[in-house]
Image (cartoon, helix red, strand yellow):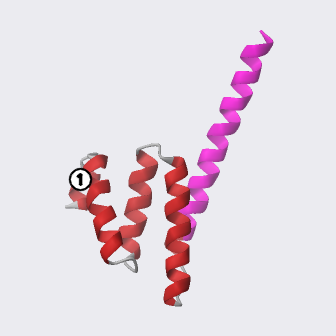
């Protein structure tokens, strides 16, 4: 169901399902990754960070490394968010000068 909702851009419903799945099976990294993507699509940047660190702690508790796929996605995501923030800061300071 969560994948269906995600693919049809019903991110609120996808988040509901994925939150439940993640609580029941925290080791399911494919669900964790999809939850990160849903949160990002909803613009919940702070929550994405929280969820990523929760996944990291869970994997440490389980004695396994976080998947390279999640790490790659998160690094790419952070670069994109950082880039957007830099663009906003630059355009805001330019408009203040005018």
Asked whether, in this view, residue 28 is left or right of residue 79, the answer is left
- The C terminus sits in image quarter: top right
- The spot of residue 70 in percent (x, y) is 50, 69
Q: Where does label 1 land, which residue?
A: 5
Judge by depth and name the residue closer to the eye, 26 or 10.
26
- The spot of residue 48 in percent (x, y) is 50, 55
> Is 75 included in the stretch rendered in magenta?
yes
Dot 1: element: helix
Name, please, the residue furthest toward the top: 98
Residue 61 in view, yes or no: yes
For label 1, count other residues whose C-alpha is less than 10 Å away and answer few (under 14), some (14-19) or many (20+): some
Asked whether, in this view, residue 4 is left or right of residue 80, the answer is left
Judge by depth and name the residue closer to the eye, 58 or 89.
58
Q: Residue at x 71, y 31 (%)?
A: 89
Above or below: residue 55 compared with residue 9? below
Asked whether, in this view, residue 27 is left or right of residue 47, the answer is left
Q: Which residues are magenta?
A: 71-98
> Is 91 included in the stretch rendered in magenta?
yes
Question: Which image quadrant is residue 21 in?
Answer: bottom left
Above or below: residue 97 compared with residue 66? above
Q: Residue at x 40, y 80 (%)?
A: 27
Q: Main secondary structure of the magenta part?
A: helix
- The spot of residue 23 in percent (x, y) is 34, 71
- The N terminus sits in image quarter: bottom left
Name, please, the residue furthest toward the bottom: 63
Q: Residue at x 39, y 76 (%)?
A: 26
């Amino acid at each position: 169901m969560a994948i269906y909702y995600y693919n049809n851009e019903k991110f609120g419903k996808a988040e509901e399902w994925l939150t439940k799945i993640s609580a029941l099976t925290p080791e399911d990294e494919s669900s964790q990754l999809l939850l990160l993507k849903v949160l990002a699509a909803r613009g919940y940047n702070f929550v994405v960070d929280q969820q990523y660190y929760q996944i990291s702690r869970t994997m440490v508790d389980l004695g396994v490394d976080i998947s390279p796929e999640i790490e790659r996605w998160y690094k790419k995501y952070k670069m994109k968010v950082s880039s957007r923030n830099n663009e906003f800061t630059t355009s805001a300071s330019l408009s203040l000068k005018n």
